[in-house]
Image: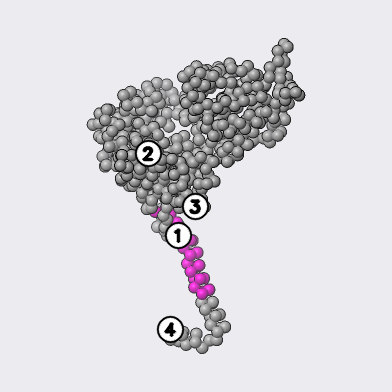
Amino acid sequence: MTSFKMKSLIASLGIRERVVFIVAGLCLIIGIFGGLVTLSNLFTKQIPIHGGTYREGIVGSPRFINPVLATSDADQDLVNLVYSGLVRIAPDGSSESDLASTWTISPDGKTYTVTLKPKLVFHDGKPLTSSDVAFTISKIQDPTLKSPLRVAWDGVTVSTPDAQTVVFQLVKPYSGFLNQLTVGILPEHIWSSISNDDWLTTQYESEPIGSGPYKIASVDRSRVGITQSVNLVAYKKFTLGEPYIKNIDIVSFANTDDAESAFHSRSIDGLAAIDSSDIGTTRTSHTNVLTSPTPRVFGLFFNPSKNKIFSDQTVIKAFNLAIDKDAIIQSVFNGYAHPLNGPLPESLDTSLPDNQTSLTLAGTLLDKDGWKLNPKTGIREKTVNKSTTRLSFSISTANTPELQASANLISDQLQKLGVETSVKVFEVGNLNQNVIRGRDFESLLFGEIVHQDTDIYAFWDSSQRSDPGLNITGYSNKHVDTLLQSVLKETDPNKQATIYSQISAQLANDAPVVFLYTPDFIYLVDQKIKNVSIPAVTDPSDRFSQINTWYTYTDHVWNFFLK
């Protein structure tokens, strides 16, 4: 039908007929469009494409973007983006290949042989070989550089049979050694020509060359030379594939308030390590809140050498029943924490009983053990050989808001049980130097950082009871010592889990501590950034371990074009 005839037809219609005609036409157009969309959805797939920019705020400025010297969170964040290690942390927290293609472990657990992927290159196009790996470890072990990683690599011998092979020889078996191979690899052709005295001042500390997912494009500095932002661009030859997001901007802020304000106004797209008390004021409708348990184990640790009531295991088991972990988590952390029932961050307690019932059971347990409630004082007492002991002790902790609030809640909860408590608050440095190192406390509410298997050994093996050992309760059990030694040698994850379960059971029976909670690592990311996942976090920078798979842009591709 010609345009003239169509106009004539419409002109000949009445008003009602015209409306019906127009509505019918619109329905036809909508139907055709809907059909095309349906066909598109049936025969095409939405996939991520390269492009876009992600801006993240950090508190503080990076100083050493160098895997050998990095100390601050700001340093570590940039190191994780710029450098690659032999292995990388997978989403499930295990190790996956990065620069390494394969690795083998000798039957005695002392020799790790790593084969590099072929044709590896640094950001400047120079080849990356086993020599670069050996050079990096030698610098970590160099005492004049004072690397924070030096202790972890003490006694490890590195050899390079050929350009693609690296052999690590350990003094004794250590099942967690694979995690150490995430350390970023330095380019020997750059750093070997820089003397140790110049390492702290060279431009490569702030404008490094690595082989990681992103390379430095530019650095914006203040008038006095302090880094204000770092712009990075995707490295096309990254061993795990070119990252989807083209540009990453890391923006430094002087304090948390400024960083949170920038996120709220959408000046930045991401913000990590948020305090749980700030979630309500920082998050918006465009925010995804990602969480992961941190490697911090918080508990109430008891020192029987300072208060003899802790020699009575029944007392501590009653405390474990009476302390309402969930109340602490909801009140102090707004729910962003997990209750614990063991010495590892992953020993989460998923079956918390009703606290009122637990409080009753705790009271019954103490009654049977001879701790009777004094009706005049409201405090339980126990009389043995005409000597009466009050169920009373002090809780020492640091002057951080979370720890003070947790200590006061625990004190209130135990008072309902008829326990007299007092809270002693110390400045963090004073607490560490005098109270903890001097073992000058009756009970201690504090957190242990458990990065790797050797940490739990340091906290619970009987050989670590004296300073500088970290066994702060003076705990001693030969069976646990044996288990701790065996888990360091075991490489089978299932067998490791069995041993850790046995350690937890023995600690629960011996009752040197009430395990409380592990706080969540909180990461805020704008919803426009897709496929963001974070593994079990041992360091805040671990959030970037899968950043090459994040994306902002997508496209529809016909199915027959997909592999």
506 horizontally vs 204: left or right: right
Please give the residue where the numbered disc 4 appears in the rendered image.
3
Sequence-first tag of 3 and 2: 2
- Dots 4 and 2: beta carbons under 8 Å? no
Disc 4 vs disc 2: which is toward the camera? Answer: 2
In this picture, is 179 found above or below 245?
Answer: above
Say which of 537 and 442 sits in front: 442
- Residue 47 place in picture, x, y as percent: 43, 54
- Dots 3 and 2: beta carbons under 8 Å? no
In this picture, is 76 found above or below 504?
Answer: below
Marks 4 and 3, Cα distance to the nearest angstrom? 48 Å
Disc 3 vs disc 1: which is toward the camera? Answer: 3
Marks 4 and 2, Cα distance to the nearest angstrom? 68 Å
Sequence-first tag of 1 and 2: 1
- Dots 3 and 1: beta carbons under 8 Å? no
Marks 3 and 1, Cα distance to the nearest angstrom? 28 Å
Q: Main secondary structure of the magenta part?
A: helix
535 horizontally vs 81: left or right: right
Residue 61 is marked as: 2
Q: Secondary structure at mark 2?
A: loop
Type of amino acid under label 4: Ser
Quarter of the picture containing the N terminus is bottom left
Residue 44 is marked as: 1
In this picture, is 204 found above or below 48?
Answer: above
Question: Dot 1, crowdedness within 10 Å: few (<14), some or many (≥20)?
Answer: some
The magenta stretch spans residue 484: no
Disc 3 vs disc 2: which is toward the camera? Answer: 2
Looking at the rendering, the stretch of residues picked out in magenta corresponds to: 26-49
Disc 1 vs disc 2: which is toward the camera? Answer: 2
Sequence-first tag of 3 and 1: 1
